[in-house]
Image: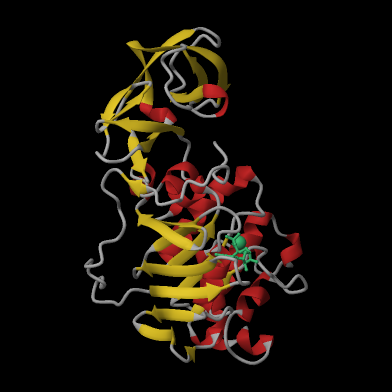
Amino acid sequence: MPDPLAVDPSAGALPARATSRPAPDRPERLNGAAPAVQARALERTFAPGAGVLDLSLEVRAGELVTLLGPSGCGKTTALRLVAGFERASSGELMLWGERVVGPALHLAPERRGVGMVFQDYALFPHLSVAENVAYGLAGRGLRRRLSGGRAGRVAEVLDLTGLSAVAGRGVHELSGGEQQRVALARALAPRPRLLLLDEPFSSLDPALRGQMRAELRAIVKRAGATALLVTHDQEEALSIADRVAFMWRGRIEQVGTPDEVYTRPATLAAARFIGDANIYDRPVERGRVATPFGEYEAPVGRSHCYVVVRPEDLQVQAGGTPGRVVEREYYGHDQVLHVALEPGATPGSPGAGGLVRVRLGPHERITATGPIALGLRRDPILFWE
Ligand SMILES: Nc1ncnc2c1ncn2[C@@H]1O[C@H](COP(=O)(O)OP(=O)(O)O)[C@@H](O)[C@H]1O
Ligand SMILES: [Mg+2]
């Protein structure tokens, strides 16, 4: 995947096609309930000259929204603003229709009804699983939290998260995946109105991550919770979300379903960061832009535009653009070819080393260094400035 930070793709980049920015007149109510989160220009300023974080986002009741963006773009800060651990310098935040941040208003975190799962889980190592979970409940003293109705709730949440069998164990005896579920159980125990999760999979090894994603989503849905989950991992963000909010340099650039943000990125930054892309910076001549795979209509009056071709949108095609496979990455479920197009076939810069990345199914028989001809399965995505 190209380094999303290598170029400045954000400068005024506009989508060539329909975007999935939420329409301002979209109904704000679902099943009669107010949206779980409505952040309107919720701002946090940093040192003079540094950027600002400007959060405008809506999470609907019952939704799992992932906040996706590169490291350092402000995701954790955004989550802390919603939780109340961080003070906004201006803007407004409503949780379930109740204003919690506004002019001269900053409701304390413990009064927002928000549950948080921290990146490092922040579990108490000297307490058992059940005690850690009970800690999330109100009441004085652990013993009291573990008795009566609260004990019932602890048992219920342990059951929900599949931890009943390890309730008495110390958290240090647990696997990474189990520890993560304890953190989730503790956050869910008081029935928060909103669950906030900061990179909850980052300390798990890759093999476990995929499994835990599905598990976490299932638990959140079973609990009927509304959740905002932060991640820098695009695959993770796409695979577990109802909707994805893409954050870039302190702002949400696009909100949409996973397939919307992937197939119709609203900005060049989104196209580069979410998924793999061959990007051509091409001049526009008489309203047309030439690519190695054909000519496309471009906005009249623009001098150049970016053409984004997803590797999986290319296919082997008799009579297509000729080239030579110079490398093949085999993944089992698919394969990625690095193709050097024939001289003359490549106007503009197709990416690192002038190679085009092509993603094919695993069953296509490809000679690792042979000739190939390529065509597009669908029109490329265009962005212009
Ligand atoms: N828009 C911004 N402009 C300048 N500094 C920022 C901005 N957003 C966050 N920061 C600062 O950058 C650092 C990383 O922010 P953080 O919210 O932890 O990013 P992330 O969780 O996306 O990696 C923090 O020190 C934060 O205060
Ligand atoms: Mg972070």
x and y, in percent, of residue 35 in the image: 33, 74
Query: Does residue 223 show up?
Result: no
Q: Is residue 297 left or right of residue 35?
A: left
Q: Nearer the viewer, residue 143 or 95?
A: 95
- Please determine whether, in this image, residue 16 is positioned above or below residue 225: above
Q: Nearer the viewer, residue 242 or 290?
A: 290
Query: Does residue 275 show up?
Result: yes
Residue 186 lies in quadrant: bottom right
Q: Nearer the viewer, residue 206 or 253?
A: 253
Quarter of the picture containing the N terminus is: top right
x and y, in percent, of residue 25 in the image: 21, 68
Q: Is residue 171 left or right of residue 93?
A: right
Q: Which quadrant of the frame does ligand 2 lie within?
A: bottom right
Residue extending farthest right: 126
- Please determine whether, in this image, residue 292 is positioned above or below residue 88: above
Q: Is residue 76 left or right of residue 269?
A: right
Q: Residue at x 61, y 74 (%)?
A: 133
Q: Residue at x 52, y 22 (%)?
A: 355
Q: Is residue 198 left or right of residue 227?
A: right
Residue 145 lies in quadrant: bottom right
x and y, in percent, of residue 378 in the image: 29, 29
Q: Residue at x 30, y 43 (%)?
A: 16
